[in-house]
């Protein structure tokens, strides 16, 4: 149980990549007051939780409606994680911050900073690998960590610096790629196994 929760938590933690998202958050919210930023982060975290739970509990219904098998989604989700990780690894400017818009809302803070495609794919696959309870608990704990980190984004970036933040992001991208390969491998094994039965 503890081992499964740890795997589910780590998979989602690297998929969300809160450390790599910190420069974006600071850039997006630097034109608003600290009180508005705190309120925005709280509402964005609540929205991200709702979106994540929707994918966790609605994923199977979507599968049934579209005729998608669990192995199909593992392969598709794995390929998606690989593509996103390769993009992040090759894009040297992806985590150098962002221009601050005049207005910023729950989008893009909740989606895609907190709940991006990689995180959503990890959640939906996680329900099949670890079950609903473990996946929900890992989602709640991860979003609690994200909320704490985003609430103290400015202080954390001053301590880490942009170079360290970028280095951590690249490591997370590599881990996401490895998780993607694992999902593709397990999905293909399941597909070929069902053909022989």
Image (cartoon, rainbow, N blue to C red):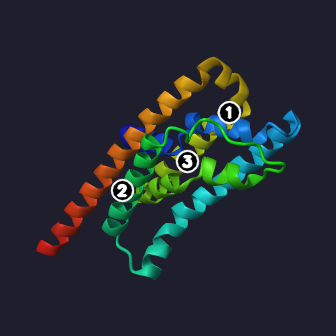
Real-space Cα distance between discs 3 and 1?
Answer: 14 Å
Element type where label 1 sits in the image: helix
Q: Mark 2 highlights which residue?
A: 78
Marks 3 and 1: which is nearer the front?
A: 1
Q: Mark 3 highlights which residue?
A: 139
* Point 64% across, 53% down: residue: 49
Element type where label 2 sits in the image: helix
Real-space Cα distance between discs 2 and 3?
Answer: 19 Å
Please state which of residues 92 and 5 is positioned toward the viewer in this rendering.
92
In the image: residue 3, left or right of residue 37: left
* Point 47% across, 48% down: residue: 134
Dot 2 or dot 3, earlier in sequence: 2
- Residue 69 picture location, percent across and down: 34, 72
Element type where label 3 sits in the image: helix
* Point 79% across, 50% down: residue: 104
Q: Which mark is residue 59?
A: none
CB contact under 8 Å: marks 2 and 3: no
Real-space Cα distance between discs 1 and 2?
Answer: 29 Å
Within the image, what quadrant is residue 80 found in? Answer: bottom left
Within the image, what quadrant is residue 64 found in? Answer: bottom left
In this picture, is 185 found above or below 151? below
Dot 1 or dot 2, earlier in sequence: 2
In the image: residue 91, left or right of residue 26: left
């Amino acid at each position: 149980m503890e081992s499964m929760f740890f795997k589910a938590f780590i998979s989602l933690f690297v998929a969300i990549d809160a450390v790599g998202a910190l420069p974006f958050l600071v850039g997006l919210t630097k034109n608003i007051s600290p009180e508005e930023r705190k309120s925005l982060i709280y509402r964005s975290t609540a929205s991200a939780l709702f979106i994540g739970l929707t994918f966790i509990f609605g994923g199977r219904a979507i599968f049934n409606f579209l005729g998608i098998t669990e192995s199909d989604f593992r392969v598709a989700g794995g390929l998606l994680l690989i593509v996103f990780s390769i993009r992040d690894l090759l894009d040297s400017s992806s985590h150098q911050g962002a221009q601050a818009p005049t207005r910023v809302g729950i989008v893009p803070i909740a989606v895609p900073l907190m709940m991006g495609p990689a995180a959503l794919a990890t959640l939906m696959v996680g329900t099949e690998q670890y079950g609903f309870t473990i996946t929900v608990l890992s989602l709640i704990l991860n979003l609690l960590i994200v909320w704490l980190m985003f609430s103290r984004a400015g202080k954390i970036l001053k301590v880490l610096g942009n170079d360290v933040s970028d280095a951590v992001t690249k490591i997370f991208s590599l881990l996401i790629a490895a998780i993607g390969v694992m999902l593709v491998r397990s999905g293909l094994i399941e597909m070929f196994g069902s053909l022989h039965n």
